[in-house]
Image (spheres, coloured by chain):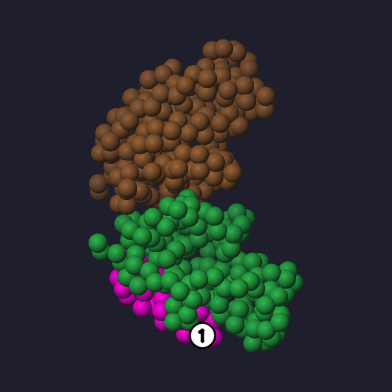
Chain colours: A brown, B green
Amino acid sequence: MKVQVLYSGGKDSSLAAILLEPFFDVELVTCTFGLERSWENAREAARELGFPFKLVRLGPEIVDESIDVMLKFGYPRPGINLVHRRALETVAVSREAKYLADGTRRDDRAPMLTAPEVRSLEDAHDVRYIRPLAGYGRRAVDDLVARHLVIVEGDTAALAKADYEAEVRSALRARLGDDVYRRIFPPEHTQSRVLRRNRT
Amino acid sequence: MKVQVLYSGGKDSSLAAILLEPFFDVELVTCTFGLERSWENAREAARELGFPFKLVRLGPEIVDESIDVMLKFGYPRPGINLVHRRALETVAVSREAKYLADGTRRDDRAPMLTAPEVRSLEDAHDVRYIRPLAGYGRRAVDDLVARHLVIVEGDTAALAKADYEAEVRSALRARLGDDVYRRIFPPEHTQSRVLRRNRT
């Protein structure tokens, strides 16, 4: 049973893959608009974890659509949710696996699909969408991450996850300027990137 | 890392235990009011699956409380949610494990804790509550059950899961009669009980 896991190289999507590993043939899938090369960090993390890796290009119209939604609402969450949904749809359309997963957690607010969006994704593409961390709160995730992964945290660009949200942020900033960017986005939080499995 | 999994002997809680097995020391915990002996079926299923088993007695005041809630609302769901929450609290109070889990699924409506109830459970008892199936829809659960478990389905009492909800149903019927019982409860659906692991 093959599952494709949307993968950023961060701790959540890495842990999601590890929780699925005993039960599925896991392939990590990183999506990019091709605007930045941070996906290379995800490829490196996938190699360290020992999972097959695939790069999927998202259509540039998704950037436009996402920026429109962010400007309309004045805050990023609806745009982040949209780009995540489009990423899931893009992977699902390829019909390469019956199962599709991501690293969203119980207490995440974005990215997050609504229940009707989940049904639509599953029915339109005959795929089963799995969220391995949906039943785990922050502390349980932290415990499992500490046990299974070695991560590095900080806020330098060198730690960048493969993050199509970050690509949308950069695109919005380049098109509309710093003022609009800062009005819509809060300051960025600390990055974490997975280095390898914790073998101790 | 020890996790106690609320266990009925049915396919959902059995699958939840199997998904946790590679990452936790699993103990199956069956709750009973002591009104019926269906918990023996859960003990038998636990033995077949090879997990340690523990029986926990729930206080009789929970039956009263649950019946009151069902009569007040006129349908069973709030009472079922209450007895489930009380069962989780009863196990959490013992402080025997840092992690507490159940077999509730993504699309379940009962039993189900609200987000504030989850926070309250976790904070009051310093426990991490895990729902391994929270990110799995019906079809994904069915696929995994078929792969990992041998189940038997039917509607005879011999298949009864260890089901504190069923104990509350019986108690309500005995106290208030068939008419009230049938007004509140829909006809019972087909039971499934786990026989053993699927080794094929």
Q: Which quadrant of the figure has residue B178?
A: bottom right
Q: Residue furthest right?
A: B72
Looking at this view, is B194 or A157 the one in front? B194
**Would you say B183 lies left or right of B86 here?**
right
Q: Could you tell me residue A115's position as x and y percent? A: 58, 46
**Mark 1 belongs to which amino acid?**
Glu
Q: Could you tell me residue A35's position as x and y percent? A: 44, 17
Residue at left offset 55%, top offset 16%: A173
Is residue B34 in the magenta section?
yes
Segment tinted magenta in the rendering: B25-52
Q: Which residue is mark 1?
A: B36
A185 shown above or below A140: above
**Would you say B107 lies left or right of B96 here?**
right
| SS at circle 1 | loop
A44 shown above or below A139: above
Q: Could you tell me residue A143's position as x and y percent? A: 40, 51
B166 shown above or below B144: below
Residue at left offset 54%, top offset 70%: B189
Q: Is residue B39 visible?
A: no
